[in-house]
Amino acid sequence: MKVSPGKIPGLLIIQPSVFEDDRGYFFESFNEKKLEEYTGPMNWVQDNEAGSAKGVFRGFHYQIPPFGQAKLVRVSRGEVLDIAVDIRPGSSHFGQVESIVLSEKNKTQFLIPEGFAHAYLVLSEYAVFNYKCNNYYAPGKEGGIHYKSIQLDTNWPIHPQELILSKKDLELPEFGSHLPYSE
């Protein structure tokens, strides 16, 4: 496993060691001991999976302290553009964005610590998105940012008018208008 820091401190890009032969492939998708060498102790409590069609955009979501969530994300089918926005109060990187393409082919994982808003956009015809969380989902303790108010560090690979969003995500506030994370 190769672990590299992201451009924004706290973000980690994880490249698992993949072993391939004529039968297929094998890789270790999670090893708590190895990961903790980079993160310190983390108590992963929940695994989630979402399947989505091309153009589906989910985000930007976060949970407010003390319900914040770190996420370890990967794609087991298809391809997504995964995006993290630093919303940590007082961070010198506040408002900065980092994105990475995750796919079943590259098997890359992205660790997003607490204090980041998270989103992803499905690029393939269909994708299965998997993620571990270090805190449980807390209804009523969540927040979000409207996607149009985030300046990506890359161009939108799908025209914004073609995005498929939930009603809830379409009604999220603009970045900076009100961030419950900083209360």
Image (spheres, rainbow, N blue to C red):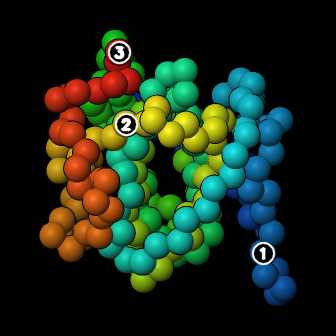
**Location of residue 77 (image quadrant):** bottom right
Q: Residue at x 78, y 81 (%)?
A: 24
The label shown at residue 25 is 1
Residue sitting nearer the eye, 93 or 168? 168
Task: Look at the numbered disc 3 and give the secondary structure of its residue.
Answer: loop
Q: Is residue 25 above or below residue 118?
A: below
* Mark-to-mark CA distance, 3 and 1: 46 Å
Q: Residue 91 location, x and y as percent?
A: 36, 17
Q: Is residue 95 above or below residue 57?
A: above
* Mark-to-mark CA distance, 3 and 2: 12 Å
**Location of residue 108 (image quadrant):** bottom right
The label shown at residue 35 is none
Which residue type carries mark 3?
Glu
**Location of residue 142 (image quadrant):** top left
Instruction: Check disc 3 and report the residue beneath it.
Output: 183
Instruction: Check disc 2 and report the residue beneath it.
Output: 143
Q: Residue 35 location, x and y as percent?
A: 73, 37
Which residue type carries mark 2?
Gly
